[in-house]
Amino acid sequence: MQSKGIINGKIYSEGRLLESNLYLQGEKVSLLSKELLPCEEIIDATGLYVLPGLIDPHVHFHLGVGAGVNEDDFEAGSKKGLLGGITTYIDFLDPVRSVNEIENSFIKRMELAAGSVSDFAFHGTVANPSCSAAELMKAYKGHGITSIKLFTTYSDTDRRTYDKMIYELLKESKATGAKIVIHAENDELITADALTLLKDHESSRPVISERSEVIKLAEMAKDTGGHLYVVHVSAGSTVKMLQEQYSKELSDGVITLESCPHYFIFNSELYEKEGGYLYTMTPPLRPEKDRQLLVDSIGQIYTIGTDHCPYPAEKKNKKFTSQIPMGVGGIQYSFLSMYTMFGEVIIDKFTKNPAMAYGLYPKKGVLQPGADADVVLFDPQKQTVIEDTDSIYNRMECKGAIERVYLRGKLVAEHGKVLSSCGEYQNRGQRR
Ligand SMILES: [Zn+2]
């Protein structure tokens, strides 16, 4: 007797939609079969896509930078995520400068994450560390963390990690398989200062600053054979350059690219319009030419992360960019908006790919026997009009609707309502 049978749906498996039934036993997927088997509960999924639970590899819940903490704590943020079909997300530990700080940074974030209603993992974060790359990796691994984030910018607040350390980390990543997760902007080419106006947000952190940093990192990744993961790629010309010069590294996992829904949907003309402050993040939105090129380059983008980091509108409504807390929300709308723009090619970028990149596969990201029974029932025929005046996606008309979400076999969201749920920390093991 199976616990649940999700029958008559189209199951996403191996990059295709198969007509089959999906059976769950407790917290796991037990089998896929066209036969009708005895179950405690039958869920009719006629006309629906049966997708693996979605993964957001880049979120910031309860982020404290500078003046205050951002808007969503782990409970609020993960609830929004569940409504958008996100059953697993990866957040970040606070930046450390030595291995001694790692234990505390882990405990602190784990305590905050106790309210999470969906499963989660963490990236480690370093800021100009003074210890060796090997020591850092070993200490993070002890906490089940196999990806380390760093910034090539923000030297003004001593968060920048310099090339010697990045090169060491990439060498070490070749040996251990860990991912080096990089916010890539060329610090020297950023002209933003205390008096930069909103209308100059894009030009003060120009596309060339991303592209010139990324090409240097790509060369270091190629040289070391380490695993470079570039977060929130904002400009299509960055992707095009890599495609032309590093196609082998892109296809064999030496270089992995992530982008965010906002870079595909919006452009930097918004910074000259009323309410433009609502669209501020770093890197900034790009001119239309680079946005269109990013859309055209979707095939090279391996994962979609939201960089979810919302602030109340009144905190962002400031004259100078230096006064604006950077970041936007959107975890609840990422799949819908990207499915609307790209269709089914987007599914892997929310499921299998982030799971493979970050050592969650095949526990997460796939519907096959033994995997966690994280399931999204998606209706491709329906339309969803986003009604959320706090969101930059307000009034967007999207294709499809998220009908039901299961986390480890349990129904956790249904028709826009979150039911009771409890997330588990994902201690990560081997990766691709
Ligand atoms: Zn981020």
Image (tube, rainbow, N blue to C red):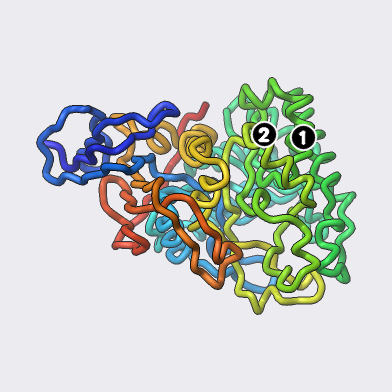
**Residue kind at label 2, given as amino acid type:** Leu
Q: Is residue 141 visible?
A: no
Q: Position of residue 156 (x, y in %)?
A: 82, 60
- Respond yes or no on whether mark 1 lies under 8 Å from ligand 1: no
Would you say the residues marked 1 and 2 are in contact, meaning their CB atoms lie under 8 Å apart?
yes
Q: Position of residue 297 (x, y in %)?
A: 68, 35
| Residue 228, numbered circle | 2
- Respond yes or no on whether mark 2 lies under 8 Å from ligand 1: no
Q: For this view, does 238 lie left or right of residue 380?
A: right
Quadrant the N terminus occupies? top left
- The answer to which of 316 and 333 lies nearer the viewer is 333
For the image shown, how many numbered marks are present on the structure? 2
- The answer to which of 152 and 303 lies nearer the viewer is 303
- The answer to which of 158 and 225 lies nearer the viewer is 225
Q: For this view, does 343 lie left or right of residue 256?
A: left
The residue under the point 78% across, 60% down is: 269
Q: CA distance from mark 1 to mark 2?
A: 8 Å
| Residue 217, numbered circle | 1
Q: For this view, does 360 lie left or right of residue 422?
A: right
The residue under the point 69% across, 46% down is: 150
Placement of 392 over or under 298, stated as above or below: below
What crowding class fits label 2: few (fewer than 14 Cα within 10 Å), some (14-19), or many (20 or more)? Answer: many
Q: Position of residue 8 (x, y in %)?
A: 24, 37
What crowding class fits label 1: few (fewer than 14 Cα within 10 Å), some (14-19), or many (20 or more)? Answer: many
Res 115 quadrant in image? bottom left
Q: Is residue 402 visible?
A: yes
**Residue kind at label 1, given as amino acid type:** Leu
Q: Earlier along the polypeptide chain: callout 1 or callout 2?
A: 1
**SS class of the residue under badge 1?**
helix
